[in-house]
Image (tube, rainbow, N blue to C red):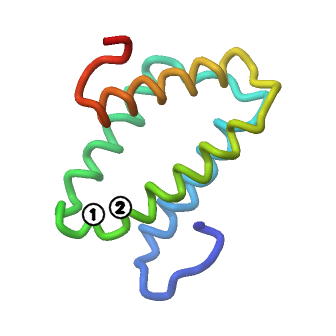
Amino acid sequence: MADTPHPSVRSEIQNHLRCCDRMLSAALALDHVAYSPEEEGIVEYYAIALLKLIPRARSGQKYRKSIHEYVRLSEALLKVDDFTTHEKELTQTMLKQLSEKLFNKPQGE
């Protein structure tokens, strides 16, 4: 995403996109070392702070497109047979959070 220059996007946002792309790529690498609790806290703090800068009306514009992308990725995950333990744990956590959000109740009820 960040590899394609966006002439209408400010350079600091393009730099942020490149950093996010690198973090996402590194996190998906087979040799990725899990983030420390301190690193997770730092990432979470800035992610939340950035989200607060976006007005809700604008942030929902691509909401439906994101859902369709998530569904396509989920379909791809169904075809993977050799998850690592870490990948299984991440997937289970995400599915639990998604279930709780979609159905407004903790998974297992």
- Say above or below: 90 vs 78: above
Q: Who's the residue at 43% across and 87% down the image?
A: 8
Front in this rendered view, residue 90 or 99:
99
Task: Tell me which corner region of the image, top left, top right, bottom left or bottom right, holds residue 19.
Answer: bottom right
- Say above or below: 9 vs 104: below
Q: Who's the residue at 75% across and 20% down the image?
A: 84
Quick one: which residue is furthest to the top in this view? 108
Image quadrant in which the C terminus is located: top left
Q: Secondary structure at mark 1?
A: helix
Q: Secondary structure at mark 2?
A: helix
Quick one: which residue is furthest to the bottom in this view? 7
Q: Who's the residue at 25% across and 46% down the image?
A: 49
Which residue corresponds to mark 2?
A: 63
Task: Tell me which corner region of the image, top left, top right, bottom left or bottom right, holds residue 45.
Answer: top left
Q: What is the number of the mark on residue 109?
A: none
Amino acid type, callout 1: Ser
- Marks 1 and 2, Cα distance to the nearest angstrom? 7 Å
Which residue corresponds to mark 1?
A: 59
- Say above or below: 103 vs 54: above
- Say above or below: 86 vs 57: above
| Cβ–Cβ under 8 Å for marks 1 and 2 | yes
* Residue 3 image offset from top left, x and y in percent: 65, 70
* Residue 101 image offset from top left, x and y in percent: 30, 34
Circle 2 packing at 10 Å, graded few (<14), some (14-19), many (20+), is few
Quick one: which residue is furthest to the right in this view? 82
Q: Nearer the viewer, mark 1 or mark 2?
A: 2
